[in-house]
Amino acid sequence: MGRTIVRDPQVFLFDEPLSNLDAKLRVQMRTEIKELHQRLQTTSVYVTHDQIEAMTMADKIVVMRDGVVEQTGSPLDLYDHPANQFVAGFIGSPAMNFLPGVLRRNGGAATVELAGGVSLPVPVNASGSDGQRVVYGTRPEHIVLADDGVATEVVVVEPTGADTQVFTKIAGIEGTSVFRERRIHLMVTDVVMPETSGHELAHTLAPLRPDMRVLFVSGYPATSTGPGPAELVAPGVAFLGKPFAPDALAAKVREVLDG
């Protein structure tokens, strides 16, 4: 790069210059190259398979597949208005979730019906006819926790500090969610308490951390009057994989919280 700069070229061509660097140095060099471009004001063509490099460094992105241009535009244009499923899945990290389903229209309202009868709302300006097979796309950061949301199975939770990535299954389809706020502090999986409702458990846990909320995932018997999957009710931090009575569970949560 240094030898090229001193020749004062009209165009720079970068062919994946950061591919052999470690993660920390890649971030540093992205900043260095962008700062260099802003200072020299020389046209630069940068080839990369890393969409993070493309999003952070480019004024304009050309997304190609098999030698064909799929879409051209600014980074945010491609992110907000992808031309097709390939672009939507390539731009953004974590990648967009794709849920195959069937479009259902009832008057002015429209939904996408997934396997198992799960229905998701559709934007009012969405096209398509009733009964058409479609792919429902949603970005991980656009998913929020809600008391009346869609029940999901939590597979893996990955806290990264700035946010928390939650890998789930919706109607058997794998998906990813990203939560910026630290709201998911207790994941109780496969907890079976035939004589205890979820509300009793919530009231037992609530005094421990009133500033936090809890996500119950699965394990409640069908006759339980307690919260269903994905209902937010109370606070705590624990990963449990066997039956616990409320008092024992509260003690376990307190143990985790304390250390």
Image (cartoon, rainbow, N blue to C red):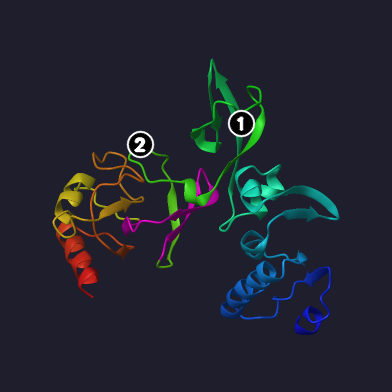
On residue 102, which mark appears?
1
Provide residue 51's location: percent of width, then percent of height.
66, 61
Q: Position of residue 184 (x, y in %)?
A: 33, 56
* Residue drawn where x is 50% and y is 50% of the image: 169
Q: Amino acid at mark 2?
A: Asp
Residue 92 is situated, as x and y percent measured from the top left of the image, at 60, 55
* Image-based side of 170 in relation to 62, left or right: left
Q: Residue at x 60, y 35 (%)?
A: 101
First in sequence, mark 2 or 1: give its number. Answer: 1
Q: Place residue 138 in its image quadrant.
A: top right
Single out the residue that lies furthest toward the bottom: 3
In the rendered structure, the answer to whether residue 34 lies left or right of residue 140 reads right
Q: Majority secondary structure of the magenta segment?
A: strand
- Label 2, label 1: how far apart the Cα atoms are: 22 Å
Query: Which mark is on residue 148?
Result: 2
Check disc 2 and report its element: helix, strand or loop.
loop
Nearest the eye: 252 or 243:
252
Does residue 99 belong to the magenta stretch?
no
Magenta stretch, residue numbers = 162-189
Whether the magenta-drawn stretch holds residue 163 is answered as: yes
Q: Residue at x 53, y 46 (%)?
A: 172
